[in-house]
């Protein structure tokens, strides 16, 4: 058991700049629910699909501004705008604190993880576009030696 305010040491298990993903190993692993279903076939994720993701928008910045003991998890819905083998585009703004959050389809299967927000292009930022990495890319990263 650990407290919400307790930090836990972690090491980088795998990382990929191309995929914008890092997988961390925590020892001992915290007691957490397990994801039981993933959808690795990215062709099953289509433009117009409704998805959802969870996270801690603004991350630790939220803790500093509200003086809460811990950040509140936020559930967001989004629509898939574009899908490639390496990218899922969402019609939702992504703030720091959502990175690494699972992206679920309507059946509750994990189809990807939130990886990026649009920062450089003001026009794109105003369109509220966020990016995710298909879960197949994460699984392939885990399998690399």
Image (cartoon, helix red, strand yellow):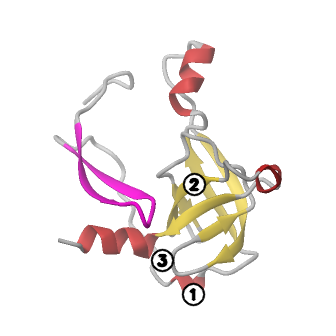
Point out the stretch of residues depicted in magenta: 10-26
The span from disc 3 to disc 2 (Cα, nearest Å) is 20 Å
Return the residue nearer the eye: 145 or 52.
Answer: 145
**Relative to 1, is 60 on the left or the right?**
right
Mark 3 Cα-neighbour bin, 10 Å: few <14, some 14–19, many ≥20: some
Measured along the vertical axis of the image, is residue 47 above or below residue 33? below
Query: Element under label 2?
Result: strand
Which quadrant would the C terminus be assigned to in this image? bottom left
**Relative to 2, is 62 on the left or the right?**
right
Q: Position of residue 11 (x, y in %)?
A: 22, 44
The span from disc 1 to disc 2 (Cα, nearest Å) is 21 Å
Q: At 62% from the left edge and 16% from the top edge, which residue is drawn?
A: 65
| Mark closer to the observer (1, 3) | 1
Q: Please say whether residue 106 is visible from this viewpoint.
A: no
Q: Which residue is mark 1?
A: 43
* Disc assigned to residue 39: 3
Whether the magenta-drawn stretch holds residue 24 is answered as: yes
The mark nearer the N terminus, 1 or 2, is 1
| Mark closer to the observer (3, 2) | 2
Q: At 78% from the left edge and 56% from the top edge, which residue is drawn?
A: 124
The span from disc 1 to disc 3 (Cα, nearest Å) is 10 Å
Q: Position of residue 126 (x, y in %)?
A: 82, 50
Query: Element under label 1?
Result: helix
């Amino acid at each position: 058991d650990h407290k919400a305010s307790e930090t836990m040491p972690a090491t980088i298990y795998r990382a990929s700049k191309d995929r914008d993903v890092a997988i961390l190993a925590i020892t001992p692993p915290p007691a957490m629910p397990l994801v039981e279903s993933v959808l690795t076939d990215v062709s099953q994720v289509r433009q117009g699909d409704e998805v959802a993701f969870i996270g801690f928008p603004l991350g630790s910045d939220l803790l500093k501004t509200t003086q809460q003991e811990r950040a509140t998890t936020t559930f967001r819905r989004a629509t898939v705008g574009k899908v490639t083998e390496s990218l899922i585009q969402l019609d939702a703004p992504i703030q720091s604190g959502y990175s690494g959050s699972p992206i679920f389809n309507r059946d509750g299967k994990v189809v990807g993880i939130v990886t990026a927000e649009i920062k450089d292009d003001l026009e794109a930022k105003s369109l509220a576009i966020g990016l995710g990495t298909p879960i197949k890319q994460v699984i392939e990263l885990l399998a690399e030696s």
